[in-house]
């Protein structure tokens, strides 16, 4: 894995120290009335990944190469929302950030494979992108939804 640091990762390390200094923030965040920006970011990631599936089926490697950086460098929530999320994460912020880096790196590998029109490598990398999404979802989604939206 490369040590590429996204801007989110850099902010995350900064805010991680704040979260450690303010451990009580975790229990003080009220449930969100409006959906957080992370949801629409995730929905766009889901659509982009779906478009990759369609492009693979057409062997449209140029389309995959164009989608991969969008997935790697997805937008970030606005800073106040990042603070809320990082406060909630507390000591798990580094783990959460690492999942994001894994997604980022896997998407770039997929883009490189697409640029070489190497279909099998694209599919292998695609599986790794999916695994990175799944890993973060398995670790954090339920707790995140419980915290920011209340029990479902
Ligand atoms: C760093 C953690 C993390 C990574 C990596 C991640 N997600 Fe998510 N994802 C979340 C969280 C947290 C939620 C719950 C957000 C919500 O529903 O408000 C979520 C929710 C979603 C949803 C459901 C949105 C909805 O409307 O219910 C989709 C779709 C999604 N992610 C797609 C992806 C895809 C595709 C990838 C990989 C390219 C990915 N995610 C990678 C954390 C992550």
Image: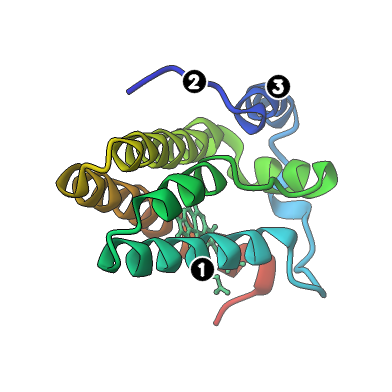
Label of residue 123 in the image: none
| Circle count | 3
Residue 134 seen by the camera: yes
Q: Is residue 136 visible?
A: no
Nearest the camera: 27 or 89?
Answer: 89
Give the numbered dot on residue 14. 3
Q: Label 2 neighbourhood size at 10 Å, few (<14), some (14-19), many (20+)?
A: few
Residue 136 horizontal/vertical position (percent): 41, 51
Alpha carbon distance from label 1 to label 3: 31 Å
Please give the residue where the numbered disc 2 appears in the rendered image.
4
Name the element at disc 1: helix
The quadrant holding residue 9 is top right
Q: Quadrant of the C terminus?
A: bottom right
User: Mark 1 and mark 2: span between their CA atoms?
Assistant: 25 Å
Where residue 128 appears, as percent x and y from the top left, is 27, 46
Residue at which label 1 appears = 47
Q: Residue at x 57, y 77 (%)?
A: 151
Tell me: 109 left or right of 73: left
- Seen as rendered, the residue at the extreme bottom is 152
Q: Using the image as rendered, state which of residue 151 and residue 43 is in the foreground.
A: 43
């Amino acid at each position: 894995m490369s040590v590429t640091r996204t801007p989110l990762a850099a902010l995350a390390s900064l805010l991680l120290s704040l979260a450690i200094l303010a451990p009580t923030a975790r229990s003080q965040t009220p449930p969100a009335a409006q959906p957080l920006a992370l949801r629409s970011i995730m929905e766009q990631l889901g659509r982009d990944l779906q478009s990759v599936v369609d492009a693979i089926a057409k062997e449209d490697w140029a389309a995959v190469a164009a989608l991969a950086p969008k997935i790697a460098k997805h937008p970030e929530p606005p800073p106040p929302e990042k603070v809320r999320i990082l406060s909630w994460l507390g000591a798990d912020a580094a783990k959460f950030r690492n999942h994001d880096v894994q997604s980022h790196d896997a998407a770039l590998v997929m883009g490189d494979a697409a640029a070489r029109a190497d279909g099998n490598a694209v599919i292998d990398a695609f599986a790794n992108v999916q695994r990175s999404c799944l890993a973060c979802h398995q670790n954090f989604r339920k707790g995140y939804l419980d915290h920011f939206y209340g029990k479902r």
